[in-house]
Image (cartoon, rainbow, N blue to C red):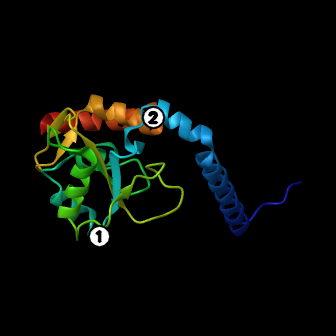
Amino acid sequence: MSRITTVEERFRRHQRDVKAYRRRHLFRRSHARFHRDLAVLPHLFLAPKVTYAAPLEQTGEEVLEGFRHQVVWTLDTAARLVCGFGFLAAQDLTGYCLCPEGVDLEASVLAALAQKRGLVGEPRPAALSLDPVLDRSPFLVLHVTANSPPELALASGHRVVTWEHLMRDLQGTLGWRPDLLNRLEDSYLGRSKAS
């Protein structure tokens, strides 16, 4: 007859498993093949020199307001604005920063972030994942583009990507996730049409 484990024993086992998962995850990300695959897979928000992250120095709502006219929100941020709920543990704000024609992309995003000093901290190149392995404070993650993604204007004044573009960004970021797409689709389509 097997012994019943206590809550404390199950919690210790859970902590051990989480540490092992993090070690394997960090090892996988440090491997040369992971970086080679990133060059092939369409993952916009990890692209070097066009994606930057800056730590939030104010609340997420204040940063959303500060970047309202400069950014088209996508991924978890768009889902939160449209549906009222997101899907990533990190509370990052993720969007496309529009760059004027003929302007250097890197200089454009650095200038946009410098204008908002106080809302966000010093920008740095984006990390290897949008869903961090370790707990950290939220970031503003901006992908700079000269071509505006298809967008919807919400009643709040925020701009978010269309459902089709959100699906593309989700699949490029998290892989094929029909469970997540099913959860978001009705709410996203219904509320974005009402806006």
Query: Eyeballing the image, is 89 above or below 147?
Result: below
- Image coordinates of residue 145 in percent, x first then y, are 25, 39
Residue 35 at least partly seen: yes
**Quadrant of image for the N terminus:** bottom right
**As drawn, is 6 to the left or to the right of 193?**
right
Q: Give whichever of 79, 131 is nearer the camera.
A: 131
Q: Which residue is mark 2?
A: 179
Q: Is residue 73 visible?
A: no
Q: Position of residue 153 (x, y in %)?
A: 13, 41
At label 1, counting other C-alpha atoms closer than 10 Å, the crowd grade (few under 14, some 14-19, many 20 or more) is some
| Looking at the image, residue 168 lies above or below residue 85 | above
Furthest toward the right, the residue is 1
User: Reading the chain from its start, which is encountered first: label 2 or label 1?
Assistant: 1
Q: Residue at x 57, y 40 (%)?
A: 34
> From mark 2 to mark 1, how far is it between C-alphas?
33 Å
Residue that label 1 marks: 57
Q: Residue at x 16, y 60 (%)?
A: 66
User: Which picture quadrant has residue 67?
Assistant: bottom left
| Location of residue 38 in the rendering, given as x and y in whole percent from the top left corner | 49, 37
- Secondary structure beneath dot 1 equals loop
The percent position of residue 166, horizontal first and vertical second, equals 31, 35
Q: Residue at x 15, y 53 (%)?
A: 68
> Which quadrant is the C terminus positioned in?
top left
